[in-house]
Image (cartoon, coloured by chain):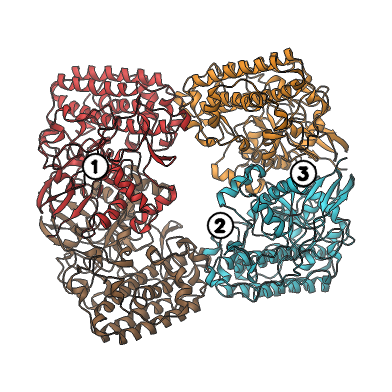
Chain colours: A orange, B red, C brown, D cyan
Amino acid sequence: MDVALDQPGLFQNQQGEQYAPAANRLAPPRTALLTRFRAVRAASLEMCRPLSVEAFRIQPSEEISPPWWNLGHTSWFFVRNVLQPFGGAQEPADDDFDYVLNSYYASLGERVARARRGSLSRPTTAQIYAYRASVDCRVEELMLALDEPRWADLAAAIMIGLNHEQQHQELFYTEIKSILAQNPPRLRCGYLASPPVPARQASAEALRLVEFADGLFEFGHTGAGWCWDNELPRHAYYLRSFALADRLVSNGEYLGFISDGGYRRQSLWLDNGWSVAQQHGWQSPMYWERVDGQWWAWTLGGMRQLELDEPVCHVSFYEADAFARWSGETFDAQRGARLPSEREWEHAAAQIADDPADAAPEAFLDPCRLHPAAALGHERLRQMFGVVWQWTASHYEPYPGYLPFAGALAEYNSKFMDNQRILRGGSCATPRDHFRRTYRNFWPSPTRFQFSGIRLAQDLED
Amino acid sequence: MDVALDQPGLFQNQQGEQYAPAANRLAPPRTALLTRFRAVRAASLEMCRPLSVEAFRIQPSEEISPPWWNLGHTSWFFVRNVLQPFGGAQEPADDDFDYVLNSYYASLGERVARARRGSLSRPTTAQIYAYRASVDCRVEELMLALDEPRWADLAAAIMIGLNHEQQHQELFYTEIKSILAQNPPRLRCGYLASPPVPARQASAEALRLVEFADGLFEFGHTGAGWCWDNELPRHAYYLRSFALADRLVSNGEYLGFISDGGYRRQSLWLDNGWSVAQQHGWQSPMYWERVDGQWWAWTLGGMRQLELDEPVCHVSFYEADAFARWSGETFDAQRGARLPSEREWEHAAAQIADDPADAAPEAFLDPCRLHPAAALGHERLRQMFGVVWQWTASHYEPYPGYLPFAGALAEYNSKFMDNQRILRGGSCATPRDHFRRTYRNFWPSPTRFQFSGIRLAQDLED
Amino acid sequence: MDVALDQPGLFQNQQGEQYAPAANRLAPPRTALLTRFRAVRAASLEMCRPLSVEAFRIQPSEEISPPWWNLGHTSWFFVRNVLQPFGGAQEPADDDFDYVLNSYYASLGERVARARRGSLSRPTTAQIYAYRASVDCRVEELMLALDEPRWADLAAAIMIGLNHEQQHQELFYTEIKSILAQNPPRLRCGYLASPPVPARQASAEALRLVEFADGLFEFGHTGAGWCWDNELPRHAYYLRSFALADRLVSNGEYLGFISDGGYRRQSLWLDNGWSVAQQHGWQSPMYWERVDGQWWAWTLGGMRQLELDEPVCHVSFYEADAFARWSGETFDAQRGARLPSEREWEHAAAQIADDPADAAPEAFLDPCRLHPAAALGHERLRQMFGVVWQWTASHYEPYPGYLPFAGALAEYNSKFMDNQRILRGGSCATPRDHFRRTYRNFWPSPTRFQFSGIRLAQDLED
Amino acid sequence: MDVALDQPGLFQNQQGEQYAPAANRLAPPRTALLTRFRAVRAASLEMCRPLSVEAFRIQPSEEISPPWWNLGHTSWFFVRNVLQPFGGAQEPADDDFDYVLNSYYASLGERVARARRGSLSRPTTAQIYAYRASVDCRVEELMLALDEPRWADLAAAIMIGLNHEQQHQELFYTEIKSILAQNPPRLRCGYLASPPVPARQASAEALRLVEFADGLFEFGHTGAGWCWDNELPRHAYYLRSFALADRLVSNGEYLGFISDGGYRRQSLWLDNGWSVAQQHGWQSPMYWERVDGQWWAWTLGGMRQLELDEPVCHVSFYEADAFARWSGETFDAQRGARLPSEREWEHAAAQIADDPADAAPEAFLDPCRLHPAAALGHERLRQMFGVVWQWTASHYEPYPGYLPFAGALAEYNSKFMDNQRILRGGSCATPRDHFRRTYRNFWPSPTRFQFSGIRLAQDLED
């Protein structure tokens, strides 16, 4: 069987031209990819170990999937995009679960409504674990057996599957945070055994601004590593001079916004943002609760008093934007403040010596905290990676010359380039080898359940 | 501790007058009640034995609670209405679970929103089982220890708790039927091991009408047995002469309505009914599916082809009413047809020798079928009890002189006497010792997930 | 042309049997009916004289039609139910306007969605006036020209059209009250030139209870006068002994309910009522506003300070029911209080010497006030007619043996016998010759824009 | 009175710096501005002359205001932004109507909910005309009387008011098109006396592509003319090489999309677009109707058969985007097709000799047609201005270095820079002196009631 006739390579357009950078086509050695496959797949299971049988099935709202689905969907992805196109072994479960594990790929057939995932008692969690194990076996078999000419294509498909699964690993942490938060106070307990220990108790240093000169710069992925289609092509863009805050906005600073009436002053908000805030009755970031005059926040380790020098988190784009406008009034009345554009952020990140994709794992904080840490150290730019995703002012649009993946995976990114905002940086829940300075995360403006925070920017005078 | 000062007896009004019939005040012997308590409580656990851990947590819609909640709520009912008022032992779980297990009793405090029960992962199913066991122990202790003067009050409260639990046992069957129906066809399997075997294959006999003369008759509960507050007081009511069908409407007859355009002819429907039918796109009873030109129906034993001589089931009041109007056109153009009033039904039921509450269990069909059976035998009136609940034309209103239970239990029935319709008879899912000819079941007109069907009636000329 | 073949008489059932009382078949003399026709038709125009061209087109919500529609629809009713079936003259406008002036008669064809009436700029108000004039001419022609054998049928159809128009005349007052209330305070002005002058300033006398003995009584219309199909047939019903308040609940008494937390105490409310009240944020009757610590109310003559001894008005069934329950706590803790059933009200009304249908017009207050007056005089039962409609505890159901009008007019009443409550008595906005003690008005429980108020009742001990 | 202390000039930031281009600060001579003021104000009245008294009050949906409001609001704008800050004469109506004529300026106080404008019968249309006349007098007085030092500020404010009114003049045409379309077919008549005569009957020529080389170009307003704050500042941007279609997409081409299943193929649509299309049941552009196998379209002159070579109009961004994707499949499978970015459009428009703002009025088609015309002539780029607004792929974002107007007018543009798409070009309903090649129109993606159409673009290979 030769799928090439029916299905172009993932980095071909419909006329068969190659358009992806060489890097994505450089097939890794089989054993190296096998090792990585096992590591990523095992990590998903490891994450689920603390879960009760109950927590596996909960879907608190349409946007949050139950953990069983997460485990199943990431396996289904290999069935449809690896096993089936490359002639791997088939199992009856592939057909049985196809309908419930498809997320939104219209080209891969009908699927259960997203909001109904929490209404299913089948497949059982045990069935999903068995399905995962079966998929793993079959993918490994295929990796060992496929003939050399098609290895590069297979490797490319597997790399997408692994990066997809890592996205769901991050999603998992934000979903389980929401799932466990549903329980009423007397019954609520965290995913971790205890709340995160604050990194330090010192108060936050005043925010400093780092300045960047104007110029025509290059943006988008380059080099030997892997990337998503939406990080391409590399392209030129002219930046005006600007300044970027050296660290994230802290909880303490955000409390200033709240106490100054930030949630009641319509003039600070975008029109859409004000509507959403009124509709939901927002008065503080998500997961904050005021108990006996003290602010507490829900963490993956349970409730904990708010740490003032930790970065504010779980704010929507609208809150980030309103905070920036308010901040401009007080913090620099002369020039105001705003959110950075995604290219300003990327340009600044390129000043930091290494791309995080190349950094050693030790460069990151303890990944088991799953909570954003206060700013430490004295680098010029701090908290760029691995703390919270940073809302940018940029709507999610294709880069000039963008070509989506071919075939079913064209739906992966391109269908969502409408009315969403780009976030950059990666958070405390992002897998360690999943950071890139060109990485474009995107969510609708009202989203708050992600680890999303604020970095300020400013115009400089030309 | 003497609760009498704070809380009047359940059958006292606020001035302390007794108003309940002597029967409800006749305290049963302790051992008899203990035996009954154990039997009813055990039956709820027995029902849940076939459930997967997943099925326990599913809430497909606001009106259908997950099974864990059902088990917990029926225990909570004893905590709040038996253990606490009568000084039984307390446990920390009583406080922990109070918020999530209260259904709607405003007088018993705050509670989790009904639609959020399916979003909770706590209490776990195991915690609920432990809570049940603890409640059972403590109630039994109390039953053995309480002093004689207060025994009658305690027995009355326990009787309400047991009748309440039996209502939830019936609810459980209808809820699990809906829960398992959520799974997509390839994954769907029933609560029972196999579909119900049809009672017989013979075609249904033509419907006969049984006539009843007019007169001033008595209605409402009487005699030595227990009853709900809404079955009282016994009162006089004048009935015109009428006729009642000797059996329920069959699936075959209902197919006639469908094929004659019943779901498309607005003139057959009440105005509200037509709106609801359009909004939901109703084209057949709930749980019917048309596959390759054949009608199938979802049962508690899985999918099964439609049996034409079984009674139609899972229809709303609006469908029952429209069917009756259509039926009048063809079946008796002279006098038309309609649904019976609740008192016509009760008067007719009184003609059957024994009240079902007094009948031996053997009088009923195999309770394990959980599916309505076709009409058998040659009694004058068939299928009055234990097949499907029969929609009546009567809105749910208090009987003249009605007094609700005192205290928190006043909310049990009286708050719902608005815009609901009475159903009579009991269904194949009703516990065997829970039938009464004066029993008033009630649901909003659009309800379809209950075992609800149709018996026709007709005016006679005076 | 002989319509009899296609369309049975209005008081025939489908088999042609007469079932209406002789009274409705007694055709009035032509000149008498012509006089009445002109009077009723002229009254609708007279009502609209104070309207601005703008007010004619406003539809503030789905349930409130703009005045142009009201004028048009009552004319359309004669086109479809009088001119067409009896061979009257036709005009092109009959076809042009048919689609927009049909209210809900499915059997009379498609129609514009009810909520879209306010979106139409055609037909213009001038077109509607011309249409009305044309219909009047043609109906009068027909009344003079039709041959004697068919006169009785024609007269019956015209009588229905006139009674229908009178219902819309009352509706008009309640609709224009709502329409003018939409304008913001600085621009708001009333339908009448000035607010109603209070009847007197004396404080309300304490409420007295009038007792009625039990017995088997007759209900429903009887005698020589005209009535709707839903007032028939005359039938027997057994009433327990009861007491009825001698007057309506006053604004002052209702303020007691408010200040005692009536709108915040869930235990006072039906479950549905509490939901509706929360959803709409009800804190007082409709049209009440609190300005600088004083209560004001919107009247058809503009804003006016609340008069404490006038009857409370513009309350929903749910508020009336909650008030009665609250009232029982304080006013008669022994026996409580409740709303009367519709038959209790009718039985009591029959004790007043004359049916209002027979009373001289002078018996009523000045109809130009359009505002409920305080209780005056010393009759045993006061304010039974012509003040506010009085919510009863009875759902709207057909009387036993009920037969709807035949043909298209079957939809007039019968399609709405679901989840509505009966009101009795007639209000200050009801046309003077439109009262009857058997008159059954009906509205959904949450309705507040009608002139609807409260009369209390009580059980007596047998 | 000196407002300067309280309110900075419109082109000052909060620190008082001037940032607007010299052009906007060059105050025109008083007589020239007076002439323009009279012309623009008169045009609004002229537009309303064909309206019936009914059409003035209709609000078919929240986004479409009734004409009376349009006339009032554009006058209110002068009261709040010209008369009050510059000390013009005051009238009681200014206060009376303030609440209902404010559109969304939170900083200018409370206002009537946008969706309720159609529920007001006050102010009457006559009151609005009187208010307009009074405002005109007072503004003219102020223009003649104000001292020279403040003339430039006054002129700037009046210029904004006039440009604002011209935007509402265009809105008026699209609103009245929708308002008159509400009437049912038999009663529907147009705003113009007759449908637009097609420019010619010849079939459309094949679409040609005009190529543009890459480079770093300048964008945003420049020169001596007036502009909105969102067209500034002038800034550099790097464009890749691209091609732009020489004309708009025609109705005939769009029919190809429909007949090829364009509205049924999910893969052609953005995810949000598909949802919206399903929700509203879109099957064709707005205002198209299929009658007896022929396509008709509603125009401002009534219903007319669809002209195949006229440009498609009244499509949402989602339809434009899906059409472009579909078009790429067939029309150029090699490189596909897409919508242009707003800067690609502006760059191409700069190739046309004159900015339309400088063109003589005769350059435009007959403005009384109010309907988009087929492509004529042989210019390199046709139909760039004055036919339909052309959806671009660009979300509405501030230009780098953007500063909103100061004071209340900061809300004019900046609050809406979220989840909207830019349209360029101006339409057949745009006032003749209101075009600019830098003009940025913006609407939410689902919008269809504007004259909005499609111009295709394409990537070129570098």
Q: What is the spatial separation of the Cα atoms under label 2 and label 3, in whole angstroms?
A: 49 Å
Closer to viewer: mark 1 or mark 3: 1
Mark sitting earlier along the chain (2/3): 2
The relative height of residue A34 versus residue C171 in the rendered view (above or below) is above
Amino acid type for the residue under numbered disc 3: Ala
Left or right placement of residue A182 versus residue A391 in this view: left
* Residue located at (80% from left, 22% from top): A26
Instruction: Residue D61: name its quadrant.
Output: bottom right
Q: To which residue does mark 3 refer? A: D333
Expressed as whole percent of the image width and height from the top left, the position of residue D199 reads 75, 70
Q: Which amino acid type corresponds to the residue marked 2 in the rendered image?
A: Ala
The residue lying toward the viewer, choosing from C350 and C203, is: C350
Residue shown at 15%/21% (left/top)? Answer: B32
Q: Which residue is mark 1?
A: B204
Q: Specify whether D53 is left or right of B14.
A: right
- Where does residue A173 sit, x and y in percent of width and height? 59, 24
Residue type at the position of mark 1: Ala
Question: Which element carries disc 1, helix, strand or loop?
Answer: loop
| Disc 1/disc 2 C-alpha distance (Å) | 61 Å
Q: Position of residue A419 (x, y in %)?
A: 67, 43
Q: Is residue D150 left or right of residue C280?
A: right
Q: Locate residue B9, reporting x and y percent.
A: 19, 33
* Residue B326, image quadrant: bottom left
Q: Residue at x 46, y 31 (%)?
A: B183
- Write down the chain letter for disc 3: D
Q: Give the number of the disc on residue D113.
A: 2
